[in-house]
Amino acid sequence: FCMSVKNTMKRQWPFLCGQHSNWRLLEIAHSTILFLGRYLSIESWVEMRTLYDVQQLLKKFGIIVYIGDRLADLELMELELRELYQARVLENREYETAMLIIRQEKRLEKEKRNRG
């Protein structure tokens, strides 16, 4: 446990400096924050805007979708996202945003196929 962190905590929370302070609890809390900071990437908080962003989200879970038919790829991505959401791996906001992007791409692909 870094001494500078302990000194910072003493300055910010002087009531913890007494004889009954529990520095071990603060050390555990600090270690947990550092651990989570390493494994929670900033990317997970960034808004998804494109299909590529959705593909990167799926890739984080080891899911790579390529069938060769774009519409079939989008359908499969939709199914995979639904399964991740039902398994409570994805947050509601991530799921809804990804599904909106996929539905928009499906609509554009269908329009493209109808035109030519």
Image (tube, helix red, strand yellow):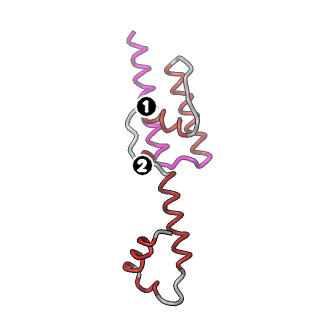
Q: Which quadrant, please, contains the C terminus?
A: top left
Marks 2/1: CA distance? 19 Å
Magenta residue check for 27: no
Element type at marker 2?
A: helix
Spot occupied by residue 36 in the image (x, y as percentages of width and height)? 51, 57
Name the residue rendered at 47%, 43% in the picture. 96
Q: Which residue bears the numbered disc 1?
A: 51
Q: Which residues are magenta?
A: 87-116
Name the residue rendered at 53%, 36% in the picture. 58
Q: Which residue bears the numbered disc 2?
A: 42
Q: Farthest residue toward the bottom?
A: 19
Q: Amino acid at mark 1?
A: Leu
- For label 1, count other residues whose C-alpha is less than 10 Å away and answer few (under 14), some (14-19) or many (20+): some
- 64 vs 22, nearest the viewer: 22
Depicted 35 relative to depicted 57: above or below: below
Corner quadrant of residue 65: top right
Answer yes or no: do the residues labelled 2 and 1 have beta carbons within 8 Å? no
